[in-house]
Amino acid sequence: MSVIDRIAGFKYLEEACLELARGFIEAALEKLDQALAKEKPPGYRVAGFRTRVLSTRIGDIRLRRRLYVKATGRKGRGRGRFLLDESLNLAPRRRMAGGLLQLAVSLSTRLPFREVSAVLSEAGMSAISHATIHQEVRRYGKELAELQERLALGQAEEPAKKCKVPIIFLEVDGVVVKRQKSSRRRLEIKLGVAYEGWQEEAPNGSRRRLVRPWVFAGVYESVEAFWEALLGELERRYEIDDNTVIVVNGDGAEWIQKTGQEHLPHAIIQLDRFHLRRMVRQVLGAKAEKKLWGLLLNGDDQAYLETIEALVTQARSEGEKQERIKLLAFLKLYREHLLDYRYRLKDGIKQWCSELNGVKLYGLGVAETVVDKKIANRMKKRGMAWSIEGAKAMAAFLVSRGNNRLHEALMRVYGPEVMNPLSVKEFVVEDSKQASEDPASWLRCHVKALDGPFEGPWTRVLRDIVSPAWSVV
């Protein structure tokens, strides 16, 4: 009979090791709290012990630590502090910590909060309610959104090497989601996708991928605030001068076509080809739209508008005529945006350009896909409703995930600043120098799994680990 058979499966051994690990951590935290007590700040005294539970990847860990208070001149006592919490950078009233928190947030960018709670429970981890997961995502997401905004506006420093490129493609769009507890039933998440061109992955150019794409999104109080933050992010990433070509692609919304031109007066702004064709097809029909599209492909925007104007008089009803007049007025308003950007790269010359400074040029239109995959799949397609704060928090995480920087974002968003008088590293070094007569005693703990009915080589190994025969030197 094998060792695995004698321990009734690997799961039994795994649970025993996890319990052993929890015992080690609790013992280490108790020792650290004792060391911090010797280095407590002047004027503070111990007012007792308090216990909190941390949910981690290896299960729930109980922290019994000292509460320190500072006496004041007024009646009562001053504000309390937990030096152990501060030394470990544990935020108050937050249960999840470490890798479990990161896992829950990562899952929350893909699944509803209730499903995240169910997945964690089914995986054998700590039972965390969907409300707790929601609160944690909202708290950390708020901090991340504020950090992203400060970086974009130049109010926070981050080491970043700017790059110089001949052309920058910027596609802008928005996604409307349901809003919670408000007379306004909708809110819009504004999004920008920037990239530097395309890299061919197939010899015939049929398959391409974007070069250095990055996503920017959020909920903003005004259109101007969005453009200010977006342009700040552009300037943070690129060295932009008079020779830098910026191409903006929009779906026809005024806050993109008009306001974008105001913030980027020298940019080439284009009406997105898909939205333009759909708009014309819905009013004039597929057959007429196909003929009109051929005019634009040949660079003849004048004939394009004249043909649509002629079609206005051929409307079969007054309602149809008004729709065509409305379409014509819109197209005339943004006439400069009608032609493909590749016709407009040479100042004052309408000439097709397939390459610019070594960058091969292709059609635009990735914003719709990014909105669908990065934002709508999580925030819109499941009948969800969001508060402004919740939408900002989730959008911040989705942006980090879309930029393949979610792990980095989770590592950067911390709780309150550490105020402990003794760091964890100092504790380890100093405590090893002042070891007690039995320095390994704090590592010894009891594992319930060893009380089971199975006996074999693995139990002797675990007992040697729990009660080591070695000592610290």
Image (tube, rainbow, N blue to C red):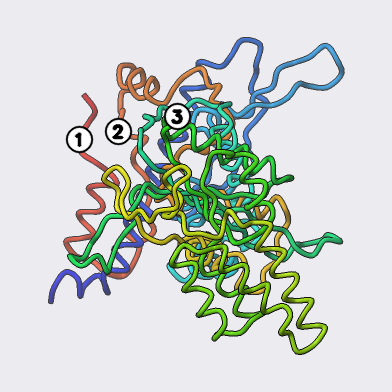
Judging from the image, what secondary structure is the residue with disc 1 in?
Answer: loop
Q: What mark, if any, has residue 470 been given in the picture? A: 1
Q: Which residue is mark 3?
A: 241
What residue type is disc 2 on?
Answer: Ala
| Looking at the image, residue 421 lies above or below residue 87 | above
Q: Is residue 22 left or right of residue 112?
A: left
Instruction: Tell me which corner region of the image, top left, top right, bottom left or bottom right, holds residue 181.
Output: bottom right
How far is the residue under mark 3 from the one under mark 1? 67 Å
How far is the residue under mark 3 from the one under mark 2? 64 Å
| Looking at the image, residue 50 lies above or below residue 353 | above
Q: Is residue 230 left or right of residue 424?
A: right
Q: Nearer the viewer, mark 3 or mark 2?
A: 3
Q: Name which of mark 3 and mark 1 comes first in the sequence.
A: 3
3 and 2 marks in contact (CB < 8 Å): no
What residue type is disc 3 on?
Answer: Asp
Q: Is residue 211 left or right of residue 153?
A: left
Judging from the image, what secondary structure is the residue with disc 2 in?
Answer: loop
How far is the residue under mark 1 from the one under mark 2? 8 Å
In front here: 146 or 191? Answer: 191
1 and 2 marks in contact (CB < 8 Å): yes
3 and 1 marks in contact (CB < 8 Å): no
Q: What mark, if any, has residue 440 been given in the picture? A: 2
In front here: 125 or 195? Answer: 195
